[in-house]
Image: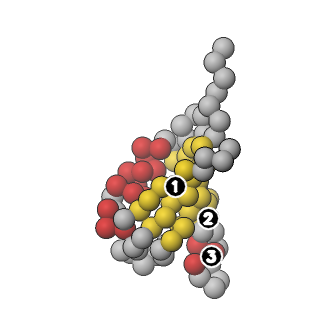
C-alpha cells in the first residue's frame, strides 16, 4: 500500500490589494492535505488593530486557486511553499 502524501504548507502573499479587504503582504497560511482539500487561515488579525482571523475550507487546490488567485490577477499574488518539513 502506498503511503499518503504529507500535508503541504503554504503562505499566500499579495503584492497589491484591489479590493482593500485583505491587505498586502502575507495574507493567509494554508495546508493542502493528502485528500486534495485545502484549509486556510486568514491573517486579518495581523493587518488591522482589531481584526479577527478566520478559517476556510476548499474541496481542492484548483478551487482555492480559482477563487483567490486566478480571479484577481491584479493583486499579483504569490504562493510560497514551506519546504522545511
Which residue is disc 2 drawn over? 54
Label 1 Cα crowd, 10 Å radius (few <14 / some 14-19 / many 20+): few
Q: Earlier in the sequence, mark 3 or mark 1?
A: 3
Q: Earlier in the sequence, mark 2 or mark 1?
A: 2
What residue sits right under mark 3 in the picture?
Answer: 46
Compared with residue 32, is residue 53 higher up or lower down, i.e. above or below? below
Residue 29 coordinates in the image, percent (x, y): 59, 58
Work out which residue is located at the far bottom of the displayed protein and give it: 49
The x, y position of residue 68, in whole percent, is 42, 58
Secondary-structure class at tag 3:
helix
Which residue lies at the image location 65% right of the left edge and 36% below the top edge?
6
As measured in the structure, the alpha-carbon distance from the residue carrying label 3 to the one carrying label 1 is 18 Å
Q: CA distance from mark 3 to mark 2?
A: 12 Å
Query: Would you say the residues marked 3 and 2 are in contact, meaning their CB atoms lie under 8 Å apart?
Result: no
Decide: is 3 above or below 74. Answer: above
Q: CA distance from mark 2 to mark 1?
A: 20 Å
Left or right of 75 in this view: 28? right
The residue located at (62%, 64%) in the rendering is 54
Q: In terms of sequence position, does the residue under pointer 3 or pointer 2 come before the other?
A: 3
Q: Which residue is mark 1?
A: 80
Q: Is residue 56 visible?
A: no
Amino acid at each position: 500500500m502506498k503511503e499518503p502524501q504529507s500535508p503541504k504548507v503554504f503562505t499566500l502573499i499579495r503584492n497589491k490589494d484591489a479590493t482593500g479587504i485583505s491587505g498586502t503582504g502575507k495574507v493567509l497560511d494554508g495546508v493542502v492535505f493528502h485528500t486534495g482539500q485545502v484549509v486556510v487561515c486568514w491573517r486579518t488579525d495581523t493587518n488591522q488593530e482589531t481584526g479577527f482571523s478566520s478559517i476556510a475550507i476548499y474541496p481542492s487546490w484548483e478551487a482555492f486557486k480559482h477563487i483567490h488567485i486566478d480571479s484577481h490577477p491584479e493583486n499579483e499574488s504569490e504562493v510560497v511553499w514551506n519546504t522545511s518539513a
